[in-house]
Image (tube, rainbow, N blue to C red):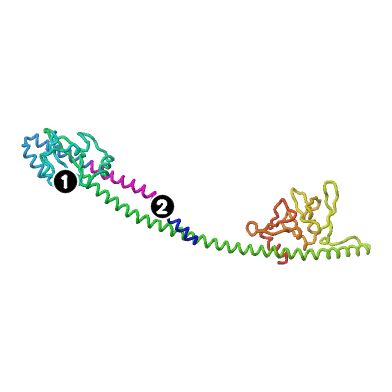
């Protein structure tokens, strides 16, 4: 249920982001494309007005009658006002001499019909685009006014801004349609990809969780068996000590030197400042070295030092009660409080009293440690 909700939120987030970014981008690209098209239209209209003005001017210079020129021009531009652009001829008073719509011939151009443009004034593509955006259905606007040489005529190049506006809107609608379809495909593909990646990640996570559960169960069993082993060792220690004392007394009675085996020591000598202390092995919590000094910590947290190395001490301790965790530590079974997972297949031993230095059993010795606990 949570995954489905996550995928839904992902779909909505990507969709909203796409609409915001895409909407802004689409508006920009539509305007840019329209301005490029209108810029081409402007150049074409200017060139056409200039060429027609030059052609008619040549006819005037060759003495052709004005009425013949008017008749020929009217015939050539008849009904061209359905195109995106067209031309007409005006005189300096604003009267239409020739026009594609013959009904407008010999009529005055309304003042607003010039759209504010005067002779030789340049219109930019941006201004043209503004006209298109605000154009009505049948609106036309003057783009260029070019004088005809040797006459009082003016060539006016018009744009069917209403018609061009509808074309641009149609292009914009098609663009948004294509954009919407592409956006839907992109969003759907993104969500599918997220779901696929999520599924792969979930499978890996499940495998890791299973491995972690196995380790947790293993550690729980390890700590449980540790407690049982500590009880067994605590029960066996008094009996072992009694046997060692009896063996020692028997050897002394026979007049022999104390040749108790190295694994049978029941006390070790340590120093606390200048005081010599004898500590029973069953009261030792752990032994460790730091900066070449060997420290002995008893079950009460009291710390003393010894001149012996860890190797020498370990050789004289009961290996069923003490364990060499690493090169730095020897720990007593009774001091182990719990065992936790540490790093990659390593074990961390938590002891009581607490050790300032972490006691880590490497992965190579983990199996040996479990065997030492009789697991």
Residue extent of the magenta highlight: 20-42
Residue 190, given in percent of the width and then of the height, sits at 43, 57
Q: Is residue 28 magenta?
A: yes
Front residue of 127 and 248: 127
Residue 14, given in percent of the width and then of the height, sits at 42, 54
Q: Are marks 2 and 1 in contact (CB under 8 Å)?
A: no
In the visual, does 269 lie left or right of 175? right
Identify residue for label 2.
16
- Image point (32%, 54%), residue name: 177
Secondary structure at badge 1 equals helix
Residue 68 in which image quadrant: top left
In the visual, does 163 lie left or right of 249? left
| Magenta highlight: main SS | helix
Residue 300, given in percent of the width and then of the height, sits at 79, 53
- Image point (94%, 62%), residue name: 255
Residue 11, given in percent of the width and then of the height, sits at 43, 56
Residue 212's place in the image compared with 304, above or below, is below
Residue 178 in which image quadrant: bottom left
């Amino acid at each position: 249920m949570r995954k489905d909700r996550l995928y839904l939120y992902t779909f909505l987030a990507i969709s909203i982001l796409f609409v915001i970014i895409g909407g802004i981008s689409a508006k920009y690209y539509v305007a840019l494309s329209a301005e490029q098209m209108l810029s081409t239209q402007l150049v074409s209209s200017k060139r056409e007005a200039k060429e027609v003005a030059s052609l008619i001017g040549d006819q005037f210079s060759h003495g052709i009658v004005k009425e013949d020129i008017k008749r020929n021009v009217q015939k050539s531009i008849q009904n061209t006002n359905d195109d995106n652009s067209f031309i007409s001829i005006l005189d300096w008073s604003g009267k239409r001499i020739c026009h594609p719509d013959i009904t407008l011939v010999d009529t005055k151009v309304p003042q607003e019909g010039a759209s504010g443009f005067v002779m030789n004034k340049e219109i930019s593509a941006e201004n043209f685009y503004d006209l298109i955006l605000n154009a009505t259905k049948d609106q036309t606007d003057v783009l260029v006014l070019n004088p005809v040489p040797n006459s009082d005529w003016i060539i006016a190049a018009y744009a069917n801004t209403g018609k061009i506006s509808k074309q641009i809107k149609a292009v914009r609608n098609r663009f948004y349609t294509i954009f919407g379809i592409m956006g839907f495909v992109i969003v759907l593909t993104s969500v599918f990809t997220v779901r696929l990646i999520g599924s792969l990640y979930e499978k890996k996570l499940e495998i890791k969780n299973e491995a972690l559960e196995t380790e947790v169960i293993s550690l729980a069993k390890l700590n449980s068996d540790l407690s049982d082993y500590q009880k067994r060792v605590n029960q066996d220690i008094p009996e072992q000590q009694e046997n060692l004392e009896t063996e020692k007394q028997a050897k002394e009675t026979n007049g022999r030197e104390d040749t108790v085996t190295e694994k049978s020591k029941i006390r070790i000598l340590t120093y606390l400042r200048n005081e010599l202390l004898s500590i029973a092995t069953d009261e030792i919590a752990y032994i460790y070295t730091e900066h070449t000094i060997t420290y002995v910590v008893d079950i009460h947290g009291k710390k003393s030092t010894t001149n012996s190395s860890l190797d020498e001490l370990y050789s004289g301790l009961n290996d069923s009660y003490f364990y060499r965790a690493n090169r730095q530590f020897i720990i007593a079974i009774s001091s182990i409080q719990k065992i936790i997972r540490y790093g990659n297949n390593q074990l961390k031993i938590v002891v009581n009293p607490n050790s300032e230095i972490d006691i880590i059993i490497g992965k190579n010795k983990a199996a040996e440690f479990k065997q030492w606990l009789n697991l």
